[in-house]
Amino acid sequence: MRIRAVLFNGVVEVKLMIRHVMETGLRKDEQGVRIPAHYIETLVVRCKDKIVLDAHLGMAVSQNPYIAFTFRDAAKGDRIEASWRDNLGDTRVDESVIS
C-alpha cells in the first residue's frame, strides 16, 4: 500500500493506493470456472490513535483501489496508519508520516 499525506493550510490530504485483486466472484476463467471472490471489506485510517477514515468496501470497487480524503487536527510529522481486511481474512497495515 502506498500512502501519501501532505499538510496544507491546516488540512491533511491523504492519498492511498492499495494493491489488491478485488475479485468480484462473478467472473469466470478460460475453462468457465467461476473465480472466487477476493475483495477488501474494511479500511481504517488512523492519526494519533484517532480514526480519520472508516470505510466499508465491497466487490464493486476496482482492482488496486485509489482512495483520497482530507481531515484536520494534525501536524507535520504525525504518523498515519492505514489497515485493511479482506473477505478471506487477509490483513495489511502500513504507516506514513505527514509532510
Image (spheres, rainbow, N blue to C red):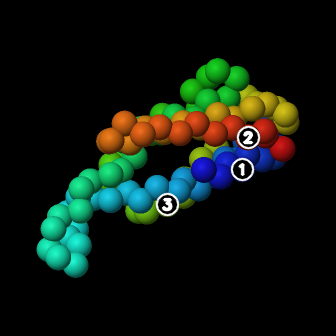
Q: Which residue is mark 3?
A: 64
Please give left or right for residue 36 compared with residue 80 in the image. Answer: left
Cα separation, mark 3 vs mark 2, equals 19 Å
Question: Which of the 4 image quarters holds residue 83?
Answer: top right
Which residue lies at the image location 32% right of the left edge and 59% below the top edge?
Answer: 23
Q: Which residue is mark 2?
A: 96
The residue furthest left is 32
Q: Secondary structure at mark 3?
A: loop
Q: CB of mark 1 within 8 Å of CB of mark 2? A: yes
Which residue type carries mark 1? Arg
Q: Residues within 10 Å of mark 1 (few under 14, many from 20)?
A: some
The dot on residue 4 is 1
Q: Residues within 10 Å of mark 2 (few under 14, many from 20)?
A: some
Question: Which of the 4 image quarters holds residue 97?
Answer: top right
4 or 31: nearer the viewer:
31
Which residue lies at the image location 79% right of the left edge and 31% below the top edge?
Answer: 78
The residue furthest top is 49
Which residue lies at the image location 14% right of the left edge and 74% below the top edge?
Answer: 32
Which residue type carries mark 3? Asn
